[in-house]
């Protein structure tokens, strides 16, 4: 009886484990594509991460286009045509996006230069008095010595 149970359980495991879900590669591809697209509602999340209804609609559209046999590039182009280049989570490197890619570096460099300039100004030694200025200070000091202080 034990042998029948073990054999039956083993056959059941083989039968269940042997059938790969045909949707798994498509689902993995769908999620990879959804990770490349920005949720147009959330804007700081990918379509894969977002729980917004619009993101769910976009994931369904990705799946539908994949089932129609469209390539990844065609699916991305579809969303770009509909929502603009903003829908790409990582925009492509082209002249119209150079400021987007280089802007943060320019801001950091400008900030470092401003910090350097500010620190250098703080370190300048106090200027020395000229002979005429020293004489003027001495005159003021002698004048104030003769007056009574309250």
Image (spheres, rainbow, N blue to C red):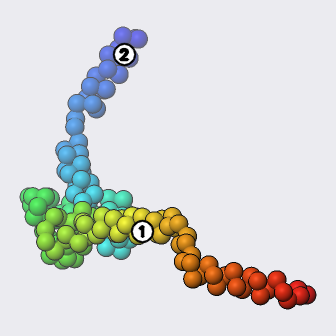
Please identify the quarter of the rendering in which residue 113 is found: bottom left
Q: Residue 128, position in %: x, y?
A: 55, 72
Q: Residue at x 20, y 63 (%)?
A: 62
Number of callouts: 2
Q: Nearer the viewer, residue 87 or 141?
A: 141
Residue farthest to the right? Answer: 150
Q: Which is nearer the N-term, disc 1 or disc 2?
A: 2
CA–CA distance in space, label 1 to label 2: 79 Å
Relative to 143, say whether 61 is above or below: above
Q: Does any portion of residue 38 appear in the rendered image?
A: no
Q: Which residue in the structure is indicated by mark 1?
A: 117
Which quadrant: the C terminus? Answer: bottom right
- SS for callout 1: helix
The quarter of the picture where residue 51 lies is bottom left
Name the image quarter holding residue 18: top left
Task: Give whichever of 44, 51 is nearer the camera.
Answer: 44
Q: Are marks 1 and 2 in contact (CB under 8 Å)?
A: no
Q: In the rendered image of this protein, does residue 56 appear above or below residue 133?
A: above
Q: Is 18 above or below relative to 11? A: below
Q: Is residue 24 visible in the rendered structure shown here?
A: yes
- On screen, residue 120 versus residue 6, left or right, reads right
Q: Position of residue 131 (x, y in %)?
A: 56, 78
Q: Nearer the viewer, residue 56 or 126?
A: 126
Q: For label 2, count other residues whose C-alpha is less than 10 Å away and answer few (under 14), some (14-19) or many (20+).
A: few
Residue on which the image places disc 2? 6
How packed mark 1 is, by other alpha carbons closer than 10 Å (few <14, some 14-19, many 20 or more), is: few
């Amino acid at each position: 009886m034990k042998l029948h149970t073990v054999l039956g359980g083993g056959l059941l495991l083989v039968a269940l484990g042997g059938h790969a879900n045909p949707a798994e590669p498509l689902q993995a591809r769908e999620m990879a594509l959804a990770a490349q697209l920005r949720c147009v509602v959330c804007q700081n999340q990918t379509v894969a991460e977002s729980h917004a209804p619009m993101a769910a609609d976009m994931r369904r559209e990705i799946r539908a286009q994949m089932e129609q046999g469209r390539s990844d590039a065609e699916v991305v182009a579809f969303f770009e045509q509909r929502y603009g280049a903003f829908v790409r989570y990582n925009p492509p490197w082209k002249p119209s996006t150079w400021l987007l890619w280089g802007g943060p570096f320019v801001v950091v460099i400008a900030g470092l230069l401003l910090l350097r300039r500010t620190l250098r100004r703080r370190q300048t030694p106090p200027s020395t008095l000229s002979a005429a200025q020293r004489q003027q200070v001495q005159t003021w000091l002698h004048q104030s010595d003769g007056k009574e202080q309250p």
